[in-house]
Image (spheres, helix red, strand yellow):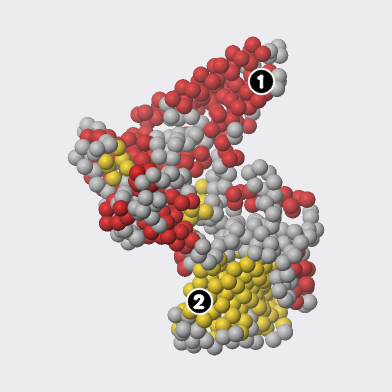
Amino acid sequence: MKLSLPLAMLLALSLAPSARAANEADYKAAYAAAEAASKEAAGMRNQWTVTVSALAAAKKAGDGGDFDRAVAAAREAEALAKASIFQATSEKEAWKAMEIR
Amino acid sequence: MKARIHLLLGSLSAALVAFALTSPRVIAADKVDPVADAKAFRNFFFQKFPNVKHEDFVNGPYSMNEDMKRQWQEKEEFPPYEFALDAGKEMFATPFKNGKTYADCFPNGGIGIRQNYPYFDEKEGKVVTLELALNRCREANGEAPYSYVKDEMASLTAYMAYTSRGKLMDIKIPDDPRALAAFENGKRYFYTRRGQMNFSCASCHVQSPGERIRAEILAPALGILNAMPIYRSEWSGMGTTSRRFVTCNSQTRAVPLEPQADEYRDVEYFLSYVANGLPISGPGARP
Amino acid sequence: MASSIRVRATSNGDTIEVQALIQHPMDTGLVKDSKGELIPAHFIQQLKFECNGKDVFVADWGTAVSKDPYVKFSFKGAKKGDELKISWIDNKGGSDTTTAKIS
Amino acid sequence: MTTTTRLHPTRRLILQGAASVALLGLGNLPFAGAHAAANDKYPEEAFKLKSEADAIKALYGKTAEPSDKVKLDAPEIAENGGVVPISVTTTLDKVTSISFLVAENPFALAASYRIPDGTIPSVANRLKMAKTTNVTAIVEADGKLYSATKEVKVTVGGCGG
C-alpha cells in the first residue's frame, strides 16, 4: 500500500507544461483546479504547508502577470493537494499497520 | 522545482521507513480495548529499552542519552521555567475582577490535580484538557481567554503541573461509547501519517526514540506528555502541549489544526491514558 | 513586579554556594526579528555579588551569555544569616538589585 | 503567507543572524554606545574583538599556556547552541580571574569573572555558541595565565519544515 503513494505523486507531477506561453485564461483555469483540490484537502483536515505556499506563489505570479510561472506553481499546488488527499484516504486503513498491539 | 525534490525526498523516506510492526496478539474484531492497548504500548517500550527505569520514560530525550541527561540535570539545578512557575503561582492566587479565583473552578482548589487531566466530560461528550478547563474558568468569570500556546497559559499549567509533581498519571475512561470513540480517535491520529514528510507521531516517537533526527534526540512516546508544559531552549520560552502538537505538525509540513481541535484533545487523551502509572514531571526543560 | 534575580545561597561548612538565575533577554544585536530588522543589542554587562560590604564575585558579560543567564560560584568568609547583595547593569543602562539571606 | 518561516524558532534566526554578520566581515562593530558606564573596569574593548588571541591580549596583556590543573567541563554535543552549560574549576591557587572564550563566535570573549581572594576558583554558566568550535577557559593565577580547551559540537536544532 505504501509504495503506491509515491507513484501517485510522481504521476500527478508529470503533467507536461503547455508549449506556448500561458495566458491569463490558462492561469485562471489552473489556479481554480489547484484551489479546488486544496479546499478538498483542507476539508479532510490533511492540508500540507507546501500546498499553501505553492498556491500563494501561483497567486502572486498570476497577479504580477507572469502567467508561465503562475501556471507552473498552480499545477504544483494541485499535485501536492492531490497527493495529500491520496495520503488521507490511504491512511484511513494504513495506520493500523503501525499500531502497537 | 525545489518542492518536487522535497516531495520525492518525503515519499522516499516514507518508503524506507515502511515496515510492519509484528503484533504480539491478534485481536479478533476491532473492539476498542484501552486497557489492552495501554498494556501493549507500555510493554513495547519496556522491552525495547530494558535498562531504562519505567518512571524515567517521562524525561523524554534525557531517558535515551546520557550526555544529554547530564546537561539536563545541570539545567534542572536552576531551571529556565523558574520564572513561568513563579508567574503561574502569582496568577493562580490573583482573583478575577469578580473576586473569584481559579481555585473556585477546580477540584481541590486546583492543587495536585494535573494528573487527572485530560478527562472525558460526559455532559459535553468530549475530552476536556487542562488548558481548555482554565480558559472556560476564565470565561465563566468574565475574563478574556488566554492563548492556548504559550505565555500565561503556559505559566498557569506550569504551576498546576508543579503541584502534581511525582503523582502518577491517572486518566479515566468512563464506560461511555463516546469516551471509547475519543480514545480510538486519538490513537488513530497518533498512528496516521501526515504532511509532505509523510510521518506520523509514531514514525518518530515509536520507531526511533533515542535516535537523532537532525540535531534532536527523539523522545519515546510513553510518558511524552508527563512533563508538559515545557521550556524549550529552541523556543527560548515556555510551550504547552498544544504548542508542541502545532510545531510537530508543521515540521512534517502538515498544516496544523486549531490549538484545541478535537483531534489534539483526543490524541492527548490517548497518550495520557497509556502513560497511567507514570509520574507527572512537569513543568519540564527540553532542548 | 518580583525581582528579575532569583538567588539561592546555601552554606555548608565555611563555604557558601551561590546560584543565580536572572530574567533578561540578553539580545546579541545580531538577530533579525520576523520583519527582518536587527533587534538591538540588549545584554547585562556587569553582575556584582557583595557580602558584608565586600565584593565576593564580579561577572563581566558579553553577548554570548545565554538568555535568562545563570551563574554558580562559591566563596568563604560568610555564615548563615549573612546578607548577599546582588546587582546587575546592562548596556542600555537598565539595572536591578536584590538581597538574599544565606540559608 | 509562508507558514514555515512564521513558525521558525527564534534560535534559528540567531544562527542566521550570526552567520550574516560573519559574512559581512564586520570588524569591531561599535556597539550601540554603551552610554551606561558599567562602572569600573568593564573590559568593553575585549568584548568587541573578534579573535580569541586579541581578546585575551586586550583582557590580560599576556598569553596563556595550557595546564591540566584547569578542569573545563562542557558537553560533547550541545543540546542547543543557545544554552550550553560550561563550567571550570582549578586547583591552582591565588586565582584572580577566570574567563570563557568561544573561538568562532562572532566575538570570541563570552564572559570574564573577577575572583576576589576568599572566593573558590570555580564557575559554572550557560553560554551561546554559534557553531561547532573550541571553548577555552582561561585562569589567571598569581599573575600567570593557564588555559584548557575543549571542542563542543553544536548542530542546528529542530527539524525545519
Residue pushed farthest left? Answer: B175
Q: What residue is disc 2 on?
A: C100
From this view, report whether residue D37 is shown above or below residue A12.
below
The answer to whether mark 1 and mark 2 are in CB contact below 8 A is: no
In the structure shown, which secondary structural element does the residue marked by tag 1 occupy? helix
Nearest the eye: D147 or B267: B267
Amino acid carrying label 1: it is: Gly
Quadrant of the rendering where the N terminus of chain B is positioned: top right
Q: In this view, does B113 lie to the left or right of A57?
A: left
Do discs 1 and 2 belong to a common subunit? Answer: no
From this view, report whether residue C39 is shown above or below residue B120.
below
Q: In this view, does D149 lie to the left or right of B264?
A: right
Q: Residue D51 carries which label?
A: none
Amino acid carrying label 2: it is: Ala
| Mark pair 1, 2: CA separation | 64 Å
> Badge 1 sits on which subunit?
A
Of the residues tagged 1 and 2, which is closer to the observer?
Answer: 2
**Residue depicted at x 19% and y 40%:** B175
**Residue depicted at x 54% and y 65%:** C4
Residue D148, how many percent across, how many down? 65, 73
Q: Residue A62 carries which label?
A: 1
Residue D134 visible here: no
Residue A37, how many percent across, how many down? 50, 20
Residue A63, how many percent across, how many down? 67, 21
Label 1: how many residues lie within 10 Å, few (<14), some (14-19) or many (20+)?
Answer: many
Label 2: how many residues lie within 10 Å, few (<14), some (14-19) or many (20+)?
Answer: some
**Residue depicted at x 51% and y 39%:** B250
**Residue depicted at x 64% and y 47%:** C33
> Badge 2 sits on which subunit?
C
Quarter of the image for residue B19 reads top left
In the structure shown, which secondary structural element does the residue marked by tag 2 occupy? strand
Residue B101 visible here: yes
